[in-house]
Image (spheres, grey):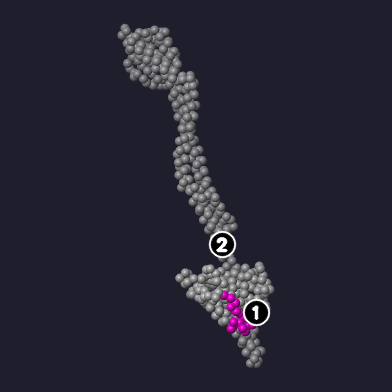
Amino acid sequence: MSIRLRLILSYIAMLVVPVLLTVVAASAIGVYYIGDIMDVYHLDFRHGSVERMIKEQTAALETIQVTIDNDPDRLMDLKYLEGLDKKLALINSGIVLKKNNNNIYVSNIADTPEILRQLPSYAAHKEHDFVPVGNNLISLRQFDFYFKDNSPGTLFIISDVSPFGKIGRQFLGSLFLAILLILIVTNGLLTFIVSRSILQPIDKLKKAAGEIKEGNLNFKVESQSNDEIGELCRSFEEMRSKLKESIELQMQYEENRKELISNISHDLKTPITAIKGYTEGIMDGVADSPEKMDKYIQTIHSKVIDVDQMIDELFLFSKLDLNREPFNFEKVEIIGYLRHITEELQLDLDKKGVQVRFAAGPDHPVIVIADREKLKRVISNIIDNSIKYMDKKPAEINIACEDKENTIAIGISDNGQGISPESVNLIFDRFYRADSSRNTSIQGSGLGLAIARRIVEEHGGQICAQSEEGIGTSIFFTLKKGSLEDR
């Protein structure tokens, strides 16, 4: 559920829930105070006493009105007045009868000086009014008439309505407190629930940001929600993960840089030491014959070539690593290309006693998209690496290719000493050497196969190795088939 929908539902709940609870509270409070009214007026809703009370009140008023209109002198009958008084007492009411402003009859409910003083004179009051008497409130109905002897008469019906006012004030006060409590509890609870679902993930993000600030990336930001905060948490976790990977990669680059410096320093030291030694031999006159002089110069030249090759590989790898080495992709008929490369390499390797041959391939032309010079560098680096670790006579290297659906697979196999299982997956790592003792008889920077992998990957292919100790090693890589327009 999104935060927007959650807030909308919360807003609706803040409107609807208090209204419903207010209705329930008003009903409950009303029932409570109706009980007080029932106690005051001796009402019983279950037995229709309210209906009887209204009926009796109406009948009493009608009787009084008829008597005043038709036979006002009957009001001077004490028994008649007592009968009326009994009926009115059922509704918490009574009567006061005056003749010539003199009290003729006074009900018990009105027999107090405070009430009697409040009664108006003849024809001086409206028919119905509420009159405060001390802390009480009375309902006053006044009927003015004339007796048969033309004496002015007034009949007051007095009802004590104070319980209604008191109970009404208590009811409204209780209802106000109930509404206030409902609003506080409802809004507080809904606000807590909604804010908790928002603030808890934000608190997690705050702590996570603090951990990152301190340099700690070894934690995980978890979120089970699918709302905007959940998406933010997942994005933050992805950022943390990528940042950790970036730092680890940077640390790995730093280690590789240190290893590179160490390897290059080690490998450069050997030829430079040899160059220095032979140069000093020439300067000291050790090469005292033309034959020795020629041997010393040839050795110095060979060592310079080794140093130049190391620097060249380091420079190439750096440009590949920074994606600054340009590639000239073109259509290449790979079968003819491999045959030509094999023949060219064989001319150079005959002197070293290494036999290179193109062993197998499709009997039809296969077009790939490749950089001829870079592809030649891949094959040369793989073969040079094989020769370095060759321990058999005669040394044999076979080049083969297999036509697949969308790629061409090229394999280069040797009959050398092989690679241990724990090392076979590491030989393409930069600066890695299977010869952990770094025997100085094996020259090289350890970048040859790493360069080969980067070039193959730039071609959109893959490279891998298979090896068996004592048998030999095979390295395979793939190239994509297709036209130049497909790239």
| Residue that numbered label 1 is attached to | 395
Specify the label residue 354 is tagged with: none
> Above or below — where is 345 with respect to 188?
below
Q: Nearer the viewer, residue 392 or 1?
A: 392
Residue displayed at 44% across by 23% down? 164
Residue 252 placement (x, y as % from top left): 59, 66
Disc 2, SS: helix
Specify the label residue 245 is tagged with: 2
Give the left or right position of residue 82, taking residue 313 as reference: left
Give the left or right position of residue 45, taking residue 308 as reference: left
**The image quarter in which residue 128 lies:** top left
Task: Tell me which amino acid carries mark 1.
Answer: Ala
**Residue furthest left in the image:** 150
Residue displayed at 48% across by 48% down? 2
Residue 177 makes an appearance in the image? no
Residue 244 placement (x, y as % from top left): 56, 60
Q: Residues within 10 Å of mark 1 (few under 14, many from 20)?
A: some
Is 47 covered by the magenta stretch? no
Q: Nearer the viewer, residue 87 or 464?
A: 464
The reply to whether discs 1 and 2 touch (Cβ–Cβ < 8 Å) is: no
Tell which tag, 1 or 2, sits nearer the viewer: 1
Residue 204 placement (x, y as % from top left): 55, 51
Residue 18 makes an appearance in the image? yes
Residue displayed at 45% across by 25% down? 166
Task: Tell me which amino acid carries mark 2.
Answer: Glu
**Residue furthest right in the image:** 470
Per the rendered image, the range of residues in magenta is: 346-361
**Residue furthest bottom in the image:** 289
